[in-house]
Image: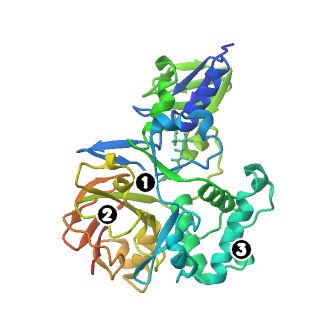
Amino acid sequence: MSERVVIIGAGVAGLACARMLQDHNRECVVVEASERPGGRVQTDVVDGYRLDHGFQVLQTGYPELTAFLDLDALRLRSFPSGVSVRYNNTFNTFADPRKYPVNIGSTIKAPFGTLIDTFRLLKLVRRVTSLAFEELFEEQEEPAIDYLQRLGFSERFINNFFLPFFAGACLERKLTASSRVLNYLIRVFAGGDAMLPELGMGEIPQQLVATLPPEIIRCNSRVVKIIGSTVTLESGEVLEASKIVVATDERSAAQLVKSTKMRKSIGETCLYFSTEWIPPHQNPFLILNGDEPGPINNLAFPSLISSRYAPAGRTLVAAIVLDAEIRKVMTSNAWYGTNAKTGTVMWLIPGSISGVIISNMHFLSKLRQRTVLIKIRNTLMITCRFVGNISVFLVCNGL
Ligand SMILES: Cc1cc2nc3c(=O)[nH]c(=O)nc-3n(C[C@H](O)[C@H](O)[C@H](O)COP(=O)(O)OP(=O)(O)OC[C@H]3O[C@@H](n4cnc5c(N)ncnc54)[C@H](O)[C@@H]3O)c2cc1C
């Protein structure tokens, strides 16, 4: 029998697994369906812009980070610690008071919650950051929404802060995931910084790849079947394995191991724009949409974190759109009813991100299979072509 371990999938998990096996002198091969390693962590370079698939950030609070990556070589650039929450037509900074004492007023008086909410959050942060990750996962679990209500957070704070925060990280907008996941996220966010490698998130898998012998990574090699200790590729080639590691995305893993257990998550589309405009925020915080569900869940300006994300004089804007929200709002009775499921509609979002003046923007890229177009000058227009025949025109007016 072969002594070789076959790893299916060359995302960061498969690559880290290969690294570990190499460190223990175990023979391994990584078979990857697509033409390049990295999986969901990729950076496309388009006309001098660096467009991360996602949008994504690297959290220095991840426990395994330094075991696999040379962080210095990634030349990490940090987001300011905190967020800016768009609420009632204003941007409200909610930041770590130790690092941003200047924002302490807006943090304590955050209008999307109460003073008690702020103190409850600080107490929660203090508690989860004092625990080890293992301890967090040993705690009793319950749906995150029940947990937050039990801790006494107001509905307003849950809806306007936790909801967009959780949706952006977990692609889940009902807070029904485990309280352990929420605690883990808070621990990761509060226990470290959100970072971008100077040249984009794609540098992360590239760094892992560079530590592995090139011949052990086989791209364009989709696995179609696992039977016992053999792995069959689309080409018909059969690989013998001593052990098989399935390091694919969840859907592919479920197909390969014939599991029916699949978690549901909503879709997310990352829209990138470029502009000469510089946002009027003192610090380039990650922006959460704390207003009524609108098309944008969160917004970021990667080139203000690392100038290498855009050519000189341009600002790169990443807008995260949660597909389920768009569909829900559009097809609700208040808007167009179920008629909106077909045909073309014009959708006005009054003041959705008003206060931000975006001019001379050029649409750069879509990630995921949706067509998107942008029209500019104080008006932001996005068209998204969904599966099927629906074209949605989003116009953020009053900008
Ligand atoms: C929109 C979005 C935003 C995110 N934001 C963040 C963030 O800010 N911070 C963060 O830390 N994480 C973020 N994540 C999560 C992060 O991207 C994933 O956790 C991580 O990339 C998972 O890595 P992986 O190696 O487990 O899987 P993947 O990256 O999915 O890699 C799996 C690989 O398996 C390959 N594969 C699949 N099927 C087969 C097959 N049959 N045969 C061979 N190969 C196969 C795929 O082509 C792929 O390369 C985000 C994810 C998404 C989608």
Residue beneath disc 3: 146
First reached walking from the N terminus: tag 1 or tag 3: 1
Question: Is ligand 1 within 8 Å of the beta carbon of the residue shown at mark 1?
Answer: yes
Front position among marks 2 and 3: 3
**Pick the front one: 352 or 245:** 352
Give the residue type at disc 1: Phe
- Give neighbour class at mark 1: few <14, some 14-19, many 20+ (Cα, 10 Å): many
Q: Is residue 201 above or below residue 343?
A: above
Q: Residue at x 44, y 59 (%)?
A: 268
What's the residue type where badge 2 is placed? Cys
From the viewer's perspective, is residue 66 above or below residue 317? Answer: above
Q: Position of residue 56 (x, y in %)?
A: 46, 52
Tell me whether circle 2 and circle 3 mark residues in contact (CB < 8 Å): no
Q: Is residue 345 left or right of residue 243?
A: left
Direction from residue 258 to residue 136 in the image, left or right: right
Which residue is pictured at 44% across the width and 40% down the height? 75
N-term-proximal mark, 1 vs 2: 1
- Judging by the rendered image, the residue that carries numbered circle 2 is 384
Of the two numbered discs 1 and 2 in the rendering, the one whose residue sits closer to the viewer: 1
Q: Which residue is mark 1?
A: 55
